[in-house]
Amino acid sequence: MNAAHLLNWTLLIPLLAVVGIVLCSRWENLRETASLGAAAILFAVVCTLYGNLRDGVELAVHWIEILPGLAISFRVDTMGMVFALIASSLWFVTVLYAIGYMRGHDEQNQTRFYACFAVAISAVMGIAFAENLFTLFVFYEVLSLCTYPLVTHAGNEKAKNGGRIYLGILLGTSIALFLPAIIGTWMLSGTLDFTPGGVFPEGTSPVLLSVLLVLFAFGIGKAALMPFHRWLPAAMVAPTPVSALLHAVAVVKAGVFSVVKVVVFIFGIDTVADLPVTSWLVYLAGASILLASLVAMRQDNFKSRLAYSTVSQLGYITLGAFMASQAAIVGSMLHITMHAFGKITLFFCAGAVYVAHHKSEISQLDGMGRVMPVTFIAFTLGALSIIGLPPLGGVWSKWFLMMGALDSGYLIMLAVLSISSLLNIVYLLEIPARAFLRPAPAGASLQEARPSSVVAMVITTLMCIALFIYGSDLYEFIRSARLV
Amino acid sequence: MSVLFSHYNYWVVIVLMMIGFYIVIAQGNLVKKLIGLNIFQTSVFILYISAGKVSGGTAPILADGITLYSNPLPHVLILTAIVVGIATTALGLSLIIRIRDTYGSVEEQDVRAAEGNRKQESC
Amino acid sequence: MLSHLPILQVILPLLGAPACLILWRPRIAWAFSFFISALAFIISGLLLKQVWQGGEIVYALGGWEAPWGIEYRIDLLNAFLLLIVSGLSTVVLAGARQSVAREIPAEKQTLFYVAWLLCLAGQLGILATGDAFNVFVFLEISSLSTYTLISLSRQREALWAAFQYLIVGTIGATFVLIGIGLMYMMTGTLNMADLAQRLPEVADTRTVFAAYAFIIVGVCLKLALFPLHAWLPNAYTFAPSVVTAFLAATATKVAVYLLIRFSFTVFGKDFSTFDVPLHSIFIGLGLIAVFSASTVAIMQRNIKRAIAYSSVAQIGYMIIGLGLGSVLGLQATLLHLFNHALMKGALFMAMVAMMLRIGGITVDDIAGLGKRMPVTALAFVTGGLSLIGVPLTVGFVSKWYLVSAAFSQGMWLVALLVVLGSLLAVMYIWRLVEIMYFRESPEQAPRGEAPLTVLLPLLLLVLGNIYFGIDTRLPVSVTEAAASSLLVEAYQGVQVGGAK
């Protein structure tokens, strides 16, 4: 088969999985097999595409021209490949985890859950491989809408309010800011194709470009740049697998991925570096990192703390994008990867504690390390990766972000990154400290979550370690991207 | 002065139109409203008919020795408009009959009051 | 036969109406009127094809050449609208039988179809004719039958709504009549093409100015442009469900067509945009309409009324595009005519299904509908998403063009307000979505979907919303050609006039 056709299948496989899931809704084992199978096939397809990309094969497909000059079309490039590899591999792991979680928790409407999940993955593939900003926007909106039923899965008042904030901010920013920015770009440059070095013609007024950049920065609400971050904590009402894959990996990474794409391929890093507004955005991202960390320290709810931690970590990636140097962009892409594997591990652990012992607050975790040793060892390693200590992957991304800050001359950002790491230690390591060092609750015996959930979190933890060891390969791959 | 009198037909039209419009707005009785609407329409008929008048011309019927006729086209047009007006009036009146059957009144304020009560009940 | 299509289009429903009366049995009357409407649709499709390939069609009625006789003139603009109106009439009519049987007293059902065909004939007539006075006649035919259709509802408020509409509608039509009369006095012709040639010579007179003002105000009354929209929410709310679906999808479109035709063909772009400050008036009123009506829509208990207010808001968008006065702006308006017909058709058709099953349409009635009528609820949500302007739906296409048009003229503020307006749409649609999916159904609430005859047209409309949001070739190419021919040719016409 022509390799480019495989690109179609990255979007179609999850959609076919939806059909399978809905058809098998009565037989849950069959239904979950459909999900797992699709995830495995998708990962295999993405890996094949990766091989082709390494061989230098041109991978592009064109679907349909919706409006004259505005087409839905896809092209595999290095950055998209990184994102697609993360999302497809973690889809498989998350389905594995979800089987244990959803059954252990006796959730309702599991068919709807798996179906929407698959649609979301299809949309993520669309974002990863989008050849132009228009395609990216289309799938961005699809992703917002198809995750709404997942966020409001519980169907109660709290879920409804969470869903309202979620959709309100995501849809609101995308319609009111992102869309005008895209149309403005289209009007100024006449193209929306991602082009290394940017699309704007020479001599476009810097004021106009600044306005557009700000519109993009805030309009891509999924990047959760403060003050448009409220949707992420609100989305935590969702079942934990959703929080894990979508709100630590797929959705939020789609946001920052879009920001990186816009900076590199719509504006061009040289243009962004020269714009007067850029430094403000850099400072804003820095503030977002620190403020979110401070808020995270005050959260007692396990998932809320992780959510604010995510807001803070997304700030790193946005920061890297706006610093707009080669090293900073590489740092951002590395951080997308490292944070994905680290944070999903943390969420898996939070969900495991909840489903096995119904504990959702951090203050309830005293001594739980002895009850769930595997879970909390995994948590500790994941947290160390996010903090950025060896021998875990997170160290590389922080390293390159700091290099980027040096390159771009934002020395103060070095301080921000260091302080933030310290804050990370405080609010993340508090949890295993409580779990291992405080006395265990009376009468507690060893009880982990369901096996499939435990397997899932072990896999992601091992990945965190593997990313440290093979960090240089990933670095070389990302660096091969043509930025200018 | 000459403007006032040379175009007196327009003044008639305007006065009639305003009278009709005023009745439509000010009267609460639905039948009177409809009569106001009729006067309003009639003023426009007169506008058309008087526009067709050619000074010195006679009725547009072919006859020997006459060369100057009034323009018959506006008259024909207005025949259509009159028919439309009659249809409107008939439909309006039949609606009023049904409103009277349902609400027991043809006064706007009674109908509005009945609606208001119902809204409160249903809330 | 093919050369007579322009008149067949109008005459079929016009003659079909009395024929329907003879058939008498409601079921047969329904089948017959559906057949007629479908024929009209096929004819309009053929007409559009002819116009697309061979250019404007001129048809002299009864062989009397213009300017003595009445001529029908089909160009891309009205061929496109003929297709929308007859198409939506056919689809809605297909799903109408059961709803009519439920909502309209048995002895009046046949009359209902008669009035429907007359209304259709009137609307098609307005679109097809090239004669200004003919416009008035057809306007009244469609209006009178519309009042009748509204008053046939079982809800007693419908009578009052119909009467209000009758008063406002007649005043509007009479204004149009005055405007046409004044134009005739100045030029001695009623033929639109003739008028377009002769009006520039007398364009500086106060009479022509008054004629234009009367026509615009009259048409805007029919159009329910803010602040002349007071009649619309009542009329839409209390009319029988299918009538609302039909009117919302077609009636305002026809009024917008008249506005375009008179502004750009008859009076010409230069008169209507340079001599009269219509730009700012239309854009201003349009924006106020978007914001005020959308805000009111958020607070309604009756969802039919909420969506009726949304129609007022959507008319605002069309008027903004018109007010921009550029080819792109006009194209945005024309696209939105088509797209809005699809969205509102789908939304009101979903309400037809709800009304049929659960008998009411307030927020209490639809609580928990997502479980009780999943297909209908999903259709409603899709229509709502299209209204919001989510990508891959038709609403997105309109929004894209409207915002681009505003941008390309440097009107950043207008563009921004347009997108902010759609956030209000998110609010009033999502409020209903939450009610349908998160509230518990009332006890012993009826369950189950509407019959297939209602569901199929509904699904057709919903699929239309998605299909034309992805494959936009037909509407985009037709509207582009129509808009540029209207504006560019009108411009050339004035140049010739100026050279004299």
Image (cartoon, coloured by chain):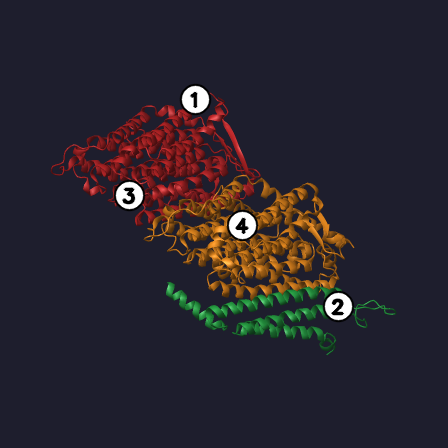
Chain colours: A red, B green, C orange
> In the picture shown, does residue B9 fall above or below C178?
below
SS class, disc 4: helix
Q: Which residue is mark 3?
A: A304
- Image point 73% across, 77% down: which residue? B5
In this rendering, which labeled residue sits more in front, label 2 or label 4?
A: 4
Q: Position of residue B21 (x, y in %)?
A: 59, 72
Q: Which amino acid, mark 4?
A: Leu
Q: How many marks?
A: 4
Give the foreground label among 2 and 1.
2
Instruction: Identify residue for label 1.
Output: A51
Q: Is residue A267 visible?
A: no
Q: Which residue is mark 2?
A: B52
Q: Residues within 10 Å of mark 4 (few under 14, many from 20)?
A: many
Instruction: Pinpoint residue C477: horizontal percent, then vertical percent.
Output: 61, 42
Please name the residue that numbered disc 4 is placed on.
C93
Contact between marks 3 and 4 (CB within 8 A): the answer is no
Q: Nearer the viewer, residue B3 or A481?
A: B3
Q: Are marks 3 and 1 in contact (CB under 8 Å)?
A: no
